[in-house]
Each structure stands twice: as structure tokens, then as C-alpha cells.
Amino acid sequence: MLAGVLATRRSSGTALTTSLVGIGAGAALVGWAPSYPLLIAAFTVYGVALGGVDASMNMQGVRVEALRGRSVMTGFHACWSVGGIVGAGYAALGLPLGVGLSVVAVVVVALAVASARHLAADAPGTQVDDLAAAATIPVPWRPVLLFGLVICLFYSADTGTGSWSAVYLQQALGAASWLVPLGYAAYQVGALVSRLLGDQLVRRVGAARVVAGGAFLGVVGFAVVLAAPVAVLAVPGFLVAGLGIAVIAPLAFAAVGAAVPPEAADAAIARMNIANYMGAILGGAVIGAVAQGGWLRVAFLVPLVLVAPILLLSRAFDGPRATRVG
């Protein structure tokens, strides 16, 4: 929400740069916090800044897509996936926590400051000078709620997979230790491939068909995970699920940006981004409740059920955005 106000008062580029500096500072503080209360404070700084990055990077992505006149959002989210892979590899180096996070902080802050002047300028007339007006700018709620529901459903399945895939393979299907991490790895590989190819598919067949096809593949993938009698057969299911649903989030952000007036786009994206965290909490909690209730073997029925409604909502992606993805 704060990112939406800052973007409207200044610019989405300013919101992104400020938020990136914030996550760098938050990460460094986490690494060196000398007490538990200060650790909580450091995570709070990091969390607020992370929410700002989530919102403002999608604001910038929508602006770049408008300037380019064609779909580019799934490619941007592919870079997000690459960043996760690079971060995991860096963490594997085993540097001391304070040192490792401080190095990351310096790199992130330096790149944020260096890239600030190269970010996309917001559309003319989309900023307001008065802070109160920025906080109360009218935003059409129908597209925010509609595409926010899609975001919530996606992140429920996505976070649930990240939190429970290894537990599922190990405890429900008796996977060997070397096989346990491969479920989520396969999911991430599928997500990366999907996002790298997603923009080309949108340009060919339109966002609505890509979202519908992605949701269908997600249902198929989670069905394979559920039906697999042994762990090695569940891994391809995670791959298919990632290949399907990973395009949904970037296309939802692009769709809401196109569905509201330019002056409301930043605020709409910021508000819709709340559904990201609602979905993350929902997915992990519901699957966890099923697992703790002794039903771990059918736990991945939850993401299957959550992804299925996106098939019905996919028609909404044939809105204003369809005029500029060719």
C-alpha cells in the first residue's frame, strides 16, 4: 500500500529504487542483529521493503509493456525465477550469515542506485503532488478484486508446493533423500521455462488462452502428483504443474494494469499485490492443516482445487490488454 502511495506521489521507479535499498538494508540488519527484538525489527524492515519491491517492479513491468506494445511480463518474472536460483546457489557457499547478507546488501543497493535513472518513466499525468490525494486516488475495484482472486489462487498453489513438496515426497511417498528436493526443483524448472516462453505464446494466441492452458496444465500436474504411487513418478507432475501455472501471476499483473485508467494503475497493482501474501498464507496453511490431520497423501488435492477455478476466470484476460499484445 505504501508503494502505491509513493509511486503515485513520485513515480514507480522511485518506489522500486527505494524498496530495493530497503531490502538491502533489511538483509544486512538481519545478518548482524544482536538480539531477538532487533532481529524482528530487521525482518520488519525487510518485509515492508519486499512488499514494495513486489508491487513497484510489477508497476514498472506494466509500464515497459505499454511502451513496447507487446507482452513482456512473463519474461520479467522469469528473471525473478533466475534470481531465486542464483540466490540459492550463493547461499550454498556457506558464508557466515552477517558477511553473506552484507555482501548481498551492498550488491543490491549499488545496482538499485546505478539503475535508477534507466527505469521507465511513468505516463504523463499519473502523479499527484498532494500526499492525501495520492492515498485516495480512485481505483476501479472490480478488476483489482477479479485479478486479485487469480493472484491469490496462484500463490496459494505456488507457496503450498514450495512448503510441502519435499515433505510430501519423503513422508507420503517414501522418497530417498536424494530424490526429496527434486520435486520442487522440477517445479521451478517448469516455472522458468514457462515464463521464458510465455510472452511468445501470448503474442500468438492471446493472454486468455495462455492462462487457461496454464491452469489446465496445473490441474493435470497436481493430479499426477496425487495419483503417483511412488515418488519418482510424482516429480514429472511437479514439472508439469510449474510449466502450467507460472505464467498466471505475471499475466494477471499485466491485465490489471491494462484494465484500469493510467493514473490508477500503480495504486491498483499495489492493492492487488496484497492477494500475493493472502494466497501464500492460505496455501501453506491449508495444505499444512490437511497434512497435520493425517491426510498428507491427499494434501496436493488442495492446490489442484485452488488452480481449477482459474480456468473459469481466464476469459477476463481477453480485456483491453488483448488490443496490444500482438
Image: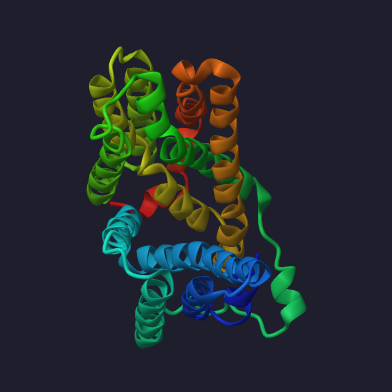
Q: Is residue 164 visible?
A: yes
Q: In this rendering, is residue 248 above or below 293?
A: below
Q: From this viewpoint, which residue is outermost toward the right?
A: 132
Residue 115: quarter of image: bottom left
Q: Nearer the viewer, residue 76 or 211?
A: 76
Locate residue 169, reporting x and y percent: 35, 26
Q: Is residue 119 visible?
A: no
In-image side of 205 versus 122 (left or right):
left
Q: Residue at x 26, y 64 (%)?
A: 93
Q: If the image is split into quadrants, where does the N terminus sit?
A: bottom right
Q: In this rendering, is residue 160 above or below 308?
A: below
In this rendering, the count of numbered labels is: 0
Residue 117: quarter of image: bottom left
Locate residue 183, reporting x and y percent: 30, 34
In-image side of 133 versus 307 (left or right):
right
Q: In this rendering, is residue 61 above or below 143?
A: below
Locate residue 58, reporting x and y percent: 46, 62
In-image side of 221 versus 197 (left or right):
right
Q: Nearer the viewer, residue 312 or 219?
A: 219
Locate residue 288, reporting x and y percent: 56, 31
Which colouring convention does the figure follow? rainbow
Q: Nearer the viewer, residue 99 or 165?
A: 99
Q: Residue at x 60, y 38 (%)?
A: 282
In-image side of 65 versus 313 (left or right):
left
Q: Nearer the viewer, residue 22 or 113?
A: 22
Q: Residue at x 40, y 23 (%)?
A: 171
